[in-house]
Image: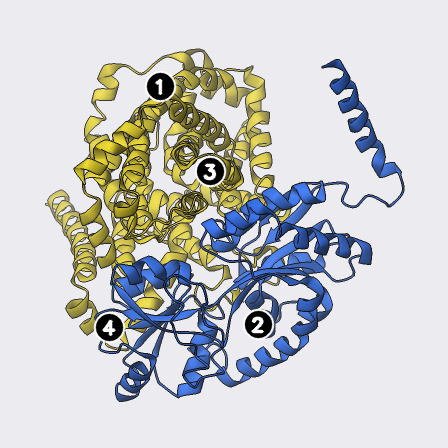
Amino acid sequence: MKLTRILGNLALGAALLAPLAAHAQYPERPITLVLPMGAGGSHDLHARGITSIVGDILGQPMVVKLVPGGAGMKGTKEVADADPDGYTIIFTHNGFDQIVPQTRDAGFDPLTSFVSVARINQAEPILCAPADRPFKTLEEFVAYAKEHPGEINFGHSGNWGALHIPTMQLINATGIDVNLIPHQGGGPALQALLAGEDDIGYQFATGARDHVKAGSINCFAVAGDMALEGDPDFAELPTMTSLGYPNVSFTMERIFMAPAGVPEDRLEKLRNAFAELIENKSFQSFINNIGEKVVFQSGSDYEAKRPDRIEEYRMLIETVGSGGN
Amino acid sequence: MLDAFFHGFELLLRLDIYFYIAAGLIVGMFVGAMPGLTTILAMAVLLPVSFKLEPMLGIPFLVGVYKGGIYGGSISAILVGIPGTGASIATTFDGPKLTRQGKGRKALEMALYSSTIGDTISDIVTLLLIGPIALIILLIGPPEVFAIIIFSLILIASVSSGSGIKGGIAALLGLGLGLVGTESIDGETRMTFGLSALSGGIPLIPLVIGVFALPEIFDAVESRAKSFISEHVDLKKTGEPLRWHEFRKSIRTILRSTALGTGIGMVPGVGQVVAAFVGYAAAKRASKHPETFGKGELDGIAGPEAANNAVNGPTLVPLLTLGIPGDNVTAILLGAFVAHGLRPGPQIFNEQGPLLYAILLSIVLANILFLGLGYLLLKPFAKAIQLKKAYLIPVIVALAFVGTLSTGTASDLGIMFVTGVCAYILRKLKFDLAPLVIAFVLAEPIELRLSQSMLYARGDILGYLFIDRPIASVFLLAGIAWILGMIFRRYRRHRRQAG
């Protein structure tokens, strides 16, 4: 007993002295993880699971700070302006990183203000409609929408939200005229589908699954060119590309970013910590339990494709105008 | 179903469940009693704890934090006039005045009993009627939410004290403040005057502390703190418990508020704050002596406290039956479910029936623990305020500042101070500021639901409302009828007085 206590004290002493050993030991204090959204969403849930594990890997706790508002731009701006010392990072998605800053004067440039740490996973929107509607496939829906211009209520998760972008892409690609209904997030959009207030709308697999099983909604297609392989319920769902709409391709990516200018060694340490995280057994079972999957991409790989993405979304924003309403 | 129910009951026959509920309740009460430390934040921080526990322990633990938090918010509302959460704003109308009259302990007890009664009845109703409630919830879309909010506002306004015009001005001010920040549809920022601190909107807690607590402090300074305390606070009597004859008078109010709260709990995105205000308004309206409200009336505690807790049962229904959380609290509970691979939704009653009933029953049983623990902790809380008289004002000042700062950013202090000074001036001009806060809270849902309804109506508003949405039209017509009735009564009274 006594020996362990002495050892413990020695370890504690070493830990206290460590900061003195010149700029060697990052991180030496807790890291703040900003989420530019409110409590209780899927990002919040991911963050609670991730921070409880990645803290052990880094040797310092990671503390979640929720900064919602301004379509995600309040929290994003806060991190853009933060000291690039590696003690403030952000957990966001590609919509807030690459799209919303282009639709308004956000006060920062995503490319020069941020650098990627890791992409944890992604979620593909799937197009669903209440089961009692007369269309059962994407083809039938497009034909029906063309026969009834302006009469279809097409719900989404709020302008420039993750479910709004593939909606605009589909409208662009098919030329249909629909009545767009914004909701505050994917949950309320799902509820409007179940209540039959909306005629069609995107959902993520996790939200739609049980309602498809219960027979209250049907799903037609998944955005992008990748089928949901291995998914117990949606593996057979055709992709938008296979149905002839390759431009309907938005995928929500959950990403960790740091303010640009963070010292190279600290960025490396953060990137390695996340690479280690995705190998962690309890992280994997957590992600599995919440019905998601790990689709990891390293910070440097993700960073390499950001400029092209930003350009692609700039063109999309130009074609659809200021939100389409 | 009955089989699942009884199996669920068997799952409850172990002691550690109650230990975790009790721990959650205690944490919740302390967090809730600290202004600024919101229940939602405490739940989010404690969510990873529930990941490590099995669902039968972790979920009741979080529910305990939630229930305790709402009651904790009422403790600081009653003792120092600073609402710990939005749900306890209406409790500050009478709570602090009761404390100054030496009835702090009575007020705390009244809050505890009405909270637990409201909660228990609403939980049992939810447990028995979960199917029908789920159907009703799907009938309540944007136009219904809009109509119900407007109807609630009319009800609240019809009992507000003082000048109707000034009440209206205060409500308009509140609406304007509520629209600052992020537009609910586009997410565009607006009316921020270039201040990035306002881009997420004016935060509720600093505003509420500014409106309700700061003017009291300024008043105290103005009237010389010393005489303010010795005149207004008789702290010696704070320890007197609630008597049966006092509680009996409020039973009707508690039952009425429970019914109102259970109903409002079915309306998504409105919740506890509105329920508390409506409960207060209804209690005042039904009272034989409405003039005592706002001056230290125990019924004014029972009304909002029973109502805000009665919301708890029905808000669980969309979470459990559809897998859709209606607010932040249920979203965090959803996290606790799914982290264990349990996905609430239409299938869960078939797949996990016994566990689900066990969790629901544990929520009902948590209320009994809540009553016991609340009673035990009531004495130390009431005692805490019996500290030396001269310290009371500094304690309120400190709580106001710490409460505001703990929400996150230093700019919130500025917001609190500016609203505090404005509120002080408005109060000198005899404005009742309750309508301002209600309108502030409801501004965003009103705007969102109205614009969604207009989009659904596609230009044919009357046709949409009266043909497609009968429930919404009933509430709107009832609101108009209520206003006409008030005008008619006033007119008759005038004529009688004249003749």
The residue closer to the viewer here, B10 or B421, is B10
Indicate the quadrant containing the N terminus of chain B: top left, top right, bottom left or bottom right: top left
Tell me, for residue A99, which label it has, or none: 2
Residue type, mark 3 in image: Thr
Q: Which residue is mark 1?
A: B372
Q: Are marks 1 and 3 in contact (CB under 8 Å)?
A: no
The residues bearing labels 2 and 3 have C-alpha atoms spaced at a distance of 33 Å
Observer able to see residue B432? no
Task: Give the foreground label among 2 and 4.
Answer: 2
Q: Kindly state the secondary structure of the residue where label 1 is placed.
A: helix
Residue type, mark 4 in image: Ile
The residues bearing labels 3 and 4 have C-alpha atoms spaced at a distance of 39 Å
Residue type, mark 1 in image: Gly
| Left or right: B19 as drawn, with respect to B399 | left
The residue closer to the viewer here, A185 or B490, is A185
Residue B208 position, x and y percent, is 48, 42
Q: Kindly state the secondary structure of the residue where label 4 is placed.
A: helix
Indicate the quadrant containing the C terminus of chain B: top left, top right, bottom left or bottom right: top left
Q: Which residue is mark 3?
A: B39
The image quarter in which residue B199 lies: bottom right
Which chain is mark 4 on? B
Task: Give the foreground label among 2 and 3.
Answer: 2
The residues bearing labels 4 and 1 have C-alpha atoms spaced at a distance of 52 Å
Dot 2 and dot 3 within a common chain: no
- Scheme of colours in the image: by chain
State whether residue A323 is above or below residue B410.
below
